[in-house]
Structures are given as C-alpha cells and as structure tokens.
Amino acid sequence: MLRLFIVLLTALFVSGCATSSFEVLDINALSSDRDDNGSFKGLERLAQRKNDGSQKIRVNIIYLHGIGYIENPEDAPLANAFIAGVADAYNNDVEEKSVASQCGRDDDNEDIKLSNAIRITDTKLRTYKTTLPGSTVKLTDLACMDRQVLDVGGNIEYVIYRVFWDDIFWENLQAPHVGQDARGVAEKPGFLSSLRRKYNGQLKDKLVNYGFSDAVVYLGPAGEQIRDAVRGAMCSAALDAAGFGFRAQGPRVNHIDICQVAALKDIESEPFAFVTESLGSKVAFDIMRDAMTDGKGNVYDDMIKGTQFFMLANQVPLLSLSDISETERMVPEPYSDEDRPTIIAMSEINDFLTYELVPFYRNLLSRTLRETDGAIDMSIDTERAKLIDLLGFNVVDMRVEFAEPVFPFVSGFVDPLFAHNGHVKQPEIIAYMLCGAKDGQLNVDGCRGLSSPYLRGKNLIRKIVADPRLPEPKGEAAVRAAQ
C-alpha cells in the first residue's frame, strides 16, 4: 500500500512538471470589441514619423524605472537589459551596448564623472514633518538623468535618457523610516535583515523595503516632487535632443527653470517615446494626464503627441485607487487620431502587481454610475471611440507569459519577481517594441529589428536561451546570450 502511494505521489508530482516558454496570449485594444486584434506602432516606425528616410533616423526614449531600483553599482545597470535587448535584435556586439551602472559615471571606473548627465533639483529646499514631533526630513535634489546612445547601424539610432530618482528619495525620505530594516551594504549588512532566513530577507528587501516604500512615498506629498523630477528631466532631454546639450544647460538645473528655457527655445527634434517599468508607468501616466488637462501648451504636450508609452508591469489600475476624489476629473483636450498618444501595456499574466488596462477600463465603466446621457455601450464602435476621447489616449494590452516555475517539478507557481521585472529580458517583447503589432500579430514588414530569422510571427521561437535571471558579471553591461 505504501509503495502504491509513493508511485501515485510521484506520478502526480511529475505530472506538474513544466518548462514555460515565451508566449503571447492576447493583444487587445480598447477600441475593439474583439480580442487579439490590437495594433500599435513600434519604435522604428515612430522614428520614421518625422523623417523621410534620406538620413539617419533617431528615436529618443525616456526610461523610467519601477519600484525597488536603488542605484547600486553591484546590481545590473538601469535599462541595461532593454539596451542589450535592442542591440541583440540588430545583432550588435556587446561593446556597443555598454552602459554605466551609475548616473553620469564611467562604466569601468565609477569615480570618473562623464558629461552625459545632468542633475534635476527642486526650486527650494523641501522640508517634510515626520511622525516624530520636531523631526523633519529634507529634499533638494530630485533626480539625475543621463544619456545613452545606441547606434544599431544602418540609419537607425536610439538615444535613451535614463532618469534616476529613487536613490535620492531613498536616502532622504525612506531610509529614515525603514532603513533600519534594510539589508545595508555587502560589507555591513543590516542587523534585522541578517536575522531573517535568506529568501525571506531578500523578498522583504526587494518587495517592501526598496519596493512598496517607493509606491507609498509616491502616493504621499512627495509624489509631486517625483513628478517634478521627471518633468524637469523631460524638458532637459528635449533640449538635449534639439542640440542644446547638457554642458550648455549646466551640471544642475531646477525643474521650473529648465522647462521655461525649453518653452522659449524653438525645439525641433526626433520624436520621443517612453519605456516605463512598474511604478514608473504610474508616474508617466500622471504626467501625461496633467499635460493633457491643464489647458496649457507646453513642452510635455509636444513630447506626448502621437507617441507611445510602453508600460511594462504597469501599476496604473492598482495605484489609481489613490486617485478617487470628490472633485470631478478633467476631460483631456480633444486630440486628433494622429496626435493621440498610445499606451501599450505589456503584462505577464502571473505578475502579482499588474492589472491589464483594457479590462480595467471596461470593468470601471461597467461598475460605476454614469448619467443617462453619459452612458457608453462598448459593443458599438462609435461608443468605444467616445470612451477613448474621454481618456485622451489609445490603450493596447499585450498579455504575455514567460516566467519559469520556482520549483522545477511544480508548474502551479512561477517566479513572481521575474514575472514582474523580466519583460525587457525577453527578446520577443523587444521585437514587438521595435516593430509593433498589426491585427494582433508582430508587424514584420520592413522592420530592421527582426534581423534574426527566428523572430517571426506571434508565438516566436526563442533566440536567447541563457537564463536571464543569472547575475551579470560586474563591469559588463551585458552578456551575450547563447549564439
């Protein structure tokens, strides 16, 4: 009887064995009443928007990180996986996609400061009262932004502006509150952290100390300063892309002054796109909404018109719970089809923290009260267009699955952290970001970002088979995956 039980248990255990591979489950558009027929431009076609093809085309990218990124030289550099993935799509060499780990620092020697970065500051010293009477925390600097240029050959160039803000906010606001609990540096780990079991300690740091605390800060009074940091960075990047570089702007600028300078300049540059992860998606979303509803024509409006927001593991539905208010929400100014921005939300179905946007807006519409003359029937084309006009932007969901099981023989639980932060390590997702989708399929026509013969069709054959969760060697920006 015991032997039979062991055999049955073994069979049940083995039956759960699964090896996940990348799969696109759906590409849905809010403008459609059918699933899996969404369309969006890729970065290559966005670059061609203001260019006749006779010279090098360029797309500028604002890259906003998510929760839990601390500017740590021992970690993989911010945006490294994205830049490496783009370079891989064009079969570029490792050396051509190297980026420094810290903002404005040399990749080989962190003590060397480069001229490809700028500091964004506030207009005054901010003083916040804490829960301990008489104690305050202060904030002046808001962000550091640097420029990474990726020339992929031919006539295409990608310029990535990386915006670092959370190391500044961590040191000034979060560490005084939860720093006693964090792991500290490698040479001197935090006492409380050292008492925990290994993986419980790692999850506490990644998800809570360095993770959720970012979201809590953003939802509080300091959230406006985070948005100011990104607004200032956007204005600085717009000037830099138009030829008024960081050296001319100065090593430090406050967000108001640099945006006033940008407003006075006759800025003409290649288009901007946005790549955001996790909390960065909500930051970008709020800035976009403010620009579309403030009734002012400014640099932000020009940057978001007709652009694309690639939101990876977005936090918009979850954090929008903090936006409910007794005050009426402003309706964005009318946008033409050409000028209306598009959000492309790329979501791993097993991610704990992400909610897709098309179901979010449909659910919000069906479970809220509206006046009779404001009712919207999503089964009718013109009614769906009315909803998009109310939002001011197009919405496309790309539902994917790529996270591997945590335990090799148990398929029912995949790595939740990798499901949340592993998007840009998927070559197929990079292919969609570069080439876009047409009627639910990868738009392969004329896209140079599909130089590999393996990257074709909706359910793509994997080209990179090395485990992307393995740590990268210090000092290298990327490791060439298996050839």
Image (tube, rainbow, N blue to C red):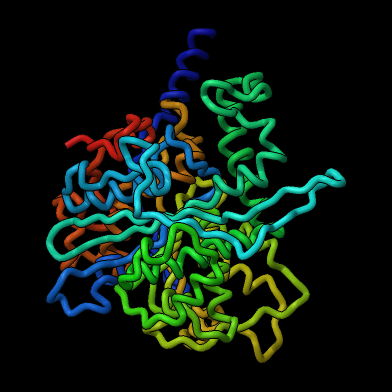
Residue lying furthest top in this view? Answer: 2
Quarter of the view holding residue 225: bottom right
Tell me the quadrant of the picture where the C terminus can be found. top left
Image coordinates for residue 5, horizontal then vertical, percent: 52, 14
Q: Is residue 349 left or right of residue 320?
A: left
Q: Residue at x 49, y 81 (%)?
A: 298
Q: Residue at x 40, y 83 (%)?
A: 339
Of residues 45 and 273, the one nearer the viewer is 273
Q: Residue at x 58, y 81 (%)?
A: 293
Q: Residue at x 55, y 54 (%)?
A: 279
Of residues 92 and 347, the one nearer the viewer is 92
Image coordinates for residue 205, horizontal then vertical, percent: 59, 34
Q: Can the viewer see residue 310?
A: no
Residue lying furthest bottom in this view? Answer: 373
Image coordinates for residue 202, horizontal then vertical, percent: 56, 29
Of residues 82 and 271, the one nearer the viewer is 271
